[in-house]
Image (cartoon, rainbow, N blue to C red):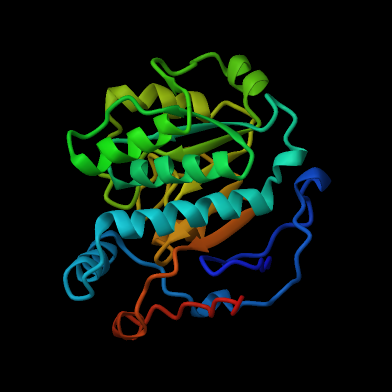
Amino acid sequence: MIVFKTVYTRVLSQVTQRIHRQFSCSTRIMAVDQGKLKYLGQVEAQKIDEELFTEYAFSVDQLMELAGYSCAVAIAKCYPVEKLTQGNGAVLVCCGPGNNGGDGLVCARHLKIFGYNPTLFYPKKPNKPLFDNLTKQCQGMELPFLSEFPTDVEVIQRSYSLVVDALFGFSFQPPVRPLFAGVIDTLKKVETPICSVDVPSGWNVEEGDPSGLQPQLLISLTAPKRCAKLFKGRFHYLGGRFVPRALEHKYDLQLPPYPGN
C-alpha cells in the first residue's frame, strides 16, 4: 500500500505488481488492514455528510476544497506530470452537475498549479454562487472549457494522458441522464487511464457495476463506499482529512491513521 507525504490523502489498497513502470510511485510502503475498514452505503454516507454540515459546522466549499486538493495530490503521486507524454501533461476533467463535479473543478485548479494542463468538460453547471465561483477560479487560471465532449475515442487517447471522472458521486440515482450517458459510454472504451472521484460514475453505490466504467485510480472521499469493494484498478486512495474523531467513532468508520507529515 502506498503512503505518501501529505496531510490530506491516505492509502486504502495495495498496488498490483503489474503497475507500469512509468506510473510507479516512489514512496515507502505501509500495511493497512483493509478488513477493518467501514464501507458506507448511500444512506449512511448522506447522514455523515449532513452531520459534517450541521453538527460540525463545515461548509460545502470548505470540504470541497479539501476533497479536490486531495484528488490532485493522489493524481500527482500516481501519474507524475513528467511521465505524462500526451499533450504535455494534458488531463481531461469531466465534471457533473453536483458536488462531485465541484470536487473535479477544485482538482483541476490544483492540477494546473502542479504543472499539468487540465481541460474541463462541464456541461451542466448548477445555478448557485458556489459553482459560479469555482468556474471563475478555473477561468482565472486560464483553464479551457470544452463546449462538446469528444466522442471519438482516438481523439481522447491522442490528446490526453489522463481522464478525471468527476461526473457523479454517492448521491447518484440511476439511470444515467442522456446528457452524460454518451460520455460514460465513450470513457468505457478509452485506453487512457481514468481516475474516478469517490465513485466510478454510473456505478450503483451499493452494488457497483462490473460492466461499467473501470478506472485505474479510485479516490474515495470521507470513507470508502460499498461499491469500492468491487474496484479492480491499480490505485485506491482515501482523500479528505476532515472527519472529526467523534464522528468517526459514532459510525465505526475504522479509518486508517494519516501520516503525521
Q: Nearer the viewer, residue 115 or 188?
A: 115
Figure disc tally: 0
Q: Residue 39 at what x, y percent from top left? A: 41, 68
Eyeballing the image, is 42 above or below 261?
A: above
- Name of the residue lying farthest toward the front: 140
Q: Residue 103 at what x, y percent from top left? A: 39, 47
Q: Nearer the viewer, residue 237 or 122?
A: 122
Q: At 37% across and 84% down in the image, what residue appears?
A: 245
Quarter of the figure with the N terminus: bottom right
Instruction: Specify whether 202 is left or right of 119.
Output: left
Q: At 53% across and 77% down in the image, what residue appears?
A: 35
Q: Residue 45 at what x, y percent from top left? A: 29, 64
Q: At 30% across and 33% down in the image, what residue appears?
A: 176
Q: At 70% across and 26% down in the image, what residue appears?
A: 86
Is residue 162 in view? yes
Is residue 234 in view? no
Q: Residue 10 at what x, y percent from top left? A: 56, 67
Instruction: Specify whether 90 is left or right of 151.
Output: right
Quarter of the figure with the C terminus: bottom right
- Name of the residue lying farthest toward the right: 21
Q: Nearer the viewer, residue 11 or 33?
A: 11
Q: Quadrant of residue 41?
A: bottom left
Instruction: Specify whether 237 is left or right of 65.
Output: right
Eyeballing the image, is 48 above or below 256?
A: above
Q: Quadrant of residue 153?
A: top right
